[in-house]
Image: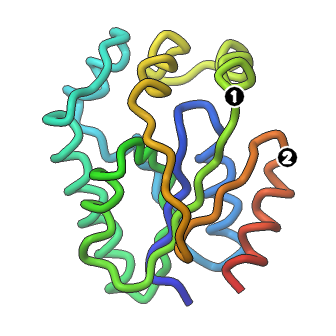
Amino acid sequence: MTDFIVIMGVSGCGKTTVAESLAEQIGGVFMEGDSYHPSENKEKMSNAIPLTDDDRWPWLDRLIEGAKHFIADRNVPVLACSGLKEEYRNYLFRDFQDYRLIFLEGSFDLIKGRMDERNHEYMTAELLQSQFDTLEIPKSSSTLLTLSIEKSPEELVAAIVEWLD
C-alpha cells in the first residue's frame, strides 16, 4: 500500500471531501492541510492576502511531520493540500518512498461558483484567482492521477481507489 496520498488542487475543488472519503474507504487517516497552517497564515488568508513562499515552507514542514507521525503508527495519511507549485510538491514528498498525488482539476468558473455557495473559515473566492495564477499543473508520472471535478465526489473516490489498487 502507498505510504502517503495527497489530494491537491486550488481552493474549492473538493480536496477535503474527496480526501476524507478516500481515507475512510482505504482505512487511512485524513489530514486537513488547512488545519496545519499557523495562525499568521490563516489571518492573512482571512484578509484576502495571498500567502508567499516564505509563509508556505513552515506549513509544508508541519504537513511532513504530521504524515510521518501517522506512518510511524502504521497508518496511511491522506492529505488534502493545495500543493500549487511543483517545488512545494517535491519538498512535500522528498522523505517518502511510495507516495501518490491526485490532482483535482476544474475551471475557474466552476470552482468560483462552488466557492460562492459555501462558507469557509478564511478562504474566500477573492483568493481563488491568486491560486490559479500560482498553480503549476503537475507533470504526468506514474505517481500522478488527474481527475476532473465535473465528476461527483463518489465517482472521484471510486476512480482513485481503482487506481491505487
Q: Residue at x 30, y 58 (%)?
A: 63
Q: Secondary structure at mark 1?
A: loop
Q: Which mark is residue 107?
A: 1
Please state the horizontal and vertical placement of residue 1, each as a whole percent of the image.
56, 90
Q: Which residue matches tag 2?
A: 151
The three-letter amino acid code for the residue at tag 1 is Ser
**What is the quadrant of residue 44 in the picture?**
top left
Q: Residue at x 53, y 32 (%)?
A: 11
Q: Is residue 29 visible?
A: no
Q: Locate the C terminus by quadrant.
A: bottom right
Q: Is residue 129 visible?
A: yes
Please state the horizontal and vertical placement of residue 38, each as a whole percent of the image.
22, 37
Q: Secondary structure at mark 2?
A: loop
The CA distance from mark 1 to mark 2 is: 13 Å
Q: Residues within 10 Å of mark 1 (few under 14, many from 20)?
A: few
- Residue 134 falls left or right of residue 113: left
